[in-house]
Amino acid sequence: MLTRLLIALLLLAGPMQGYAAPPVPAALRAWQPGAEAPSAEARRSPLYIAPVPAAAHERVTFTITEREGVNRQLAPVRGGLPFRRGELTDPSHIRLLDAQGRERPVQGLATSYWPEGTVRWLCIDFTTDIKAGQTQSFTLAYGTDVRTTSRSSLKVHQRQRAGAVDINTGDLRLAFEPGAGFAHVIAADGMGGKRTIQGRLDLSDADGRPAATLPLQITAVRLVEHGPVQATVYLEGRYGKQTVRRSFPKRGHLPPRNQTSPKFAFHGHVRVYGDSTRLDVIHAFGYNGEESRDFVKRYGLILPVEIGRETTLIYGGERGRAVRTPLHNRLTLVQGGHSQWVLEGDAQATGKRFGGWAALQHAGGRHYTTIALRHAWQQWPVTLEALAAEGALALYVYGAPKDEFLDLRYEGDFFGKSKSMYVGQELSAYYDGDRKGKAAGLLKISELAIDLARDPEGVGRGVHQPLTPIVEPARIAATKALGHIGTYAGARAAGLRADHMKRWAEALLQFPVIQHEANGLYGWVDWPDQADCKKSVDGRFQLMMRGGVGWTNGERASLAYYYHFAAGGAEKYLHLGHAMSLHNIGIDLEHPGGEMYPGTPHRHNQVHWNSPGSERQAAVRAWLVDYWMTGHPEIRRILFDLYLPLHRPASGNGPDPVLVAYRGGAENYPNLMAYLTDRDPIWIKHHKGIDWATYEAVSQGQTLPKGRYKGGMMTWKNGYIKLQNTRPGKLQGYWLTYGSDDRLTDYASLFGYEVTLKALRAFGDSFLGKGNTAPKLNRYHSPEYGYTGYYLLTRNQRVLQELSKRWQKERRSTPGKPLVWDSYGVQGTAEQWHKLTKKGYGKNGFKIQAANIVENILGFAAFEHRHRLKARAAKP
């Protein structure tokens, strides 16, 4: 309970307290993971993921590909690589070699662990020069005998008393400290002496006229990552000094709370690189104001620049291509709508979609100051402005043109007066309390790149497609770092029509891009969410916005992007999934949600789960996988400072209320994933007890209650859950949609406990055992991973027959090739997309179809295992 009392609101949450695994509380040691050895049956079964000996010197090869069509200099590369259980014991024991065998500096951060503490996912950082469209190959050596011999020019000094961090990259000196300003540039070519990068927020009145300017104030600074390649600094602050105080009543297990928050909050992460003048910035702006009077005109960062008589502005014009124009007084570039940008001031130009970047070339042409926003036109309105008299280059992440402003009011039928989002009219009346229908707590997460010397076009255009290390899908499957998953290539070799399933997945998952293209949805709030709709008419989808249920990114819809990529889908699906996660975890974890409490999903994300009898799942599984694959520090901060603590078990022997139910199981699986992220055993304190309860219920012919308000809340004490409110009958198929079988399969594969295997066997037998019948085929039932775990444990051939039956049903309409899309739009129409799928519509259409994609990939593993057994048996 004390932990929950200390949870901060999204906009007030403090910085991360470090990434090290926490110590095990004495009260938990009796049931901590590893206290019981895996059963003999588990050790014989392919289900159990047994540790391998620590590697002395192994290698993994990966590639990076430049996909934006631009040469890049010293471009950062960041992303996750998977490892087998036990093989990598120390993330610092790595060495990077390029295709010519030359060593490159590299840095590693463990983003996920196996239960015994070895590395499961390692996020690596390095830099490289790369040509447009080029693919480069690298090899990462790792193991107990591996040490790097490269040296770093990066120097970091922490001033503890001042709460400040100084960084010298070799080409640039920076100071981050509390007070006015985003960062202080001590030395950089083209910027003269010490200059300050400022943050600024402008307010307007209800007619769009300027009302006030609020400077960015940094209140806390902390170093969160540091190695031979890069250092990352966390900044907490606010625009202006205004605060708001609100009270939150007791709701269910959540205690009452009084809270004071900044009205306009700021969270930032700044990453700088050795021998570089580049800063990568994660900029999170928190709106905690009153939408009927606190109107945001624009906010962003302002770079100081030495302006001479021959200063030239280079900007990303149509499709990001570089355009040059002299700066005399002022140049303002605005993407003011979905399909229009304008340049005003010393020169004039117009177009459809701009590149979202600009640079000032200093006299002599040797040095540049560049700033760029990822996915800029999609998040309109965005403004870039160069001012000669002030010596400034500004990027306003939200930059409203002329008399417009960020209008978050909910008024009228379907809130037609609001220019900022499509929402349904039920929202304001749906909740009780003082935050009813309010926008307070909304967080907008944006990704920027700044360079203070070189490579304007490479930085500006390249920001949209970051360089990402890509391993073969077979490596991800073989390491089991995402559990027992299959791949499209492996499923094809096993005799499945995997090419059809891959095309289907690609066509469905591009729907948000198609819909935003067709309907011109509001960028800053809604990109890249997918609105509830009917099929297209005259090139536009018919939106069906009924309150909070109008947006369908939540639940496992987002998770499908990561699993599709891992199984062999294109890299751009990983990046689209990442954009969805930034939207969902910021915009959708806004102000108090269904329980009127900070951190509970609200407007767009699964509001209908907040009715009595249901639980939330949100997109937390996708957010955790994203962190494993990208190492995104803002996603980690929000997860572990805000969202997950709401579901954190208390330490001690209980009694604790625990959800053992079809829908309630959805909240248990993210806790297992949290444990695999920070190795705090308290996250899975109840899981063995849950397995006992499941086994006892099923073996006694009882079915578990469906949800919290239908008796699904049971009591855990001293490691045991007493069954209650069960009734005769076998398990319902519907529960499988919500992750209960996924958790059971993964928990069994990680620990191999006897009772967990009994629960998994009992679960599978209840559907596919002798004399039992599987649930009727229905897209709401997604049992593939539970069936896969059951098959790996028992080799019951009915599993393969049942999965084949399900997939045969999907073959009746084979889609054509998915539409082509890139950073600037789609080559195709809404009607063309409709002919591909005819799916994805209605309240559950998109997310249930996407959940089936995840389950297909998990189900592949059963067929691939059978294929390997046959191949082994066929060898002489």
Image (tube, rainbow, N blue to C red):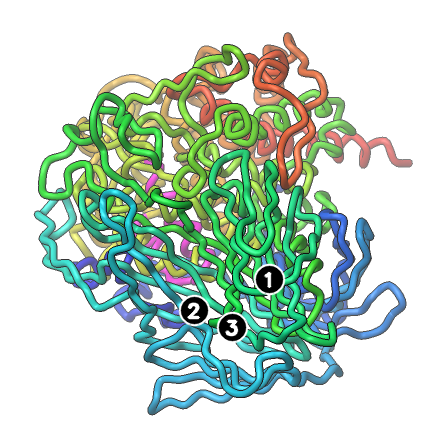
Is residue 743 found left or right of 407 in the rendered image? Answer: right
Residue found at the very far top of the displayed protein: 812
Between marks 2 and 3 in the image, the one whose residue lies nearer the viewer? 3
Is residue 582 found left or right of 108 in the rendered image? Answer: left
Cα distance between the residues tagged 1 and 3: 38 Å
Measured from the top left, where is residue 284 in percent x and y?
39, 57
- Name above or below for residue 636 compared with residue 365: above
Residue 451 badge: none
Measured from the top left, where is residue 691 in percent x and y?
36, 40
Q: Which residue bears the numbered disc 1?
A: 123
The residue that appears at 59% across and 10% down in the rendered structure is 809
Is residue 103 found left or right of 866 in the rendered image? Answer: right
Between marks 1 and 3 in the image, the one whose residue lies nearer the viewer? 3
Is residue 536 found left or right of 717 in the rendered image? Answer: right
Mark 1, residues whose alpha carbon is within 10 Å: few (<14), some, or many (≥20)? many
Mark 3, residues whose alpha carbon is within 10 Å: few (<14), some, or many (≥20)? some
Amino acid found under the numbered disc labelled 1: Cys
Amino acid found under the numbered disc labelled 3: Gly
Q: Which residue bears the numbered disc 3?
A: 391
Q: Which residue bears the numbered disc 2?
A: 21
Q: Earlier in the sequence, mark 1 or mark 3?
A: 1
Q: Secondary structure at mark 3?
A: loop
The number of numbered discs placed on residues in the rendered structure image is: 3
Measured from the top left, where is residue 620 in percent x and y?
40, 45
Q: Is residue 76 visible?
A: yes
- Name above or below for residue 405 compared with residue 87: above
Bounds of the magenta span?
A: 665-686
- Towards the viewer: 330 or 706: 330
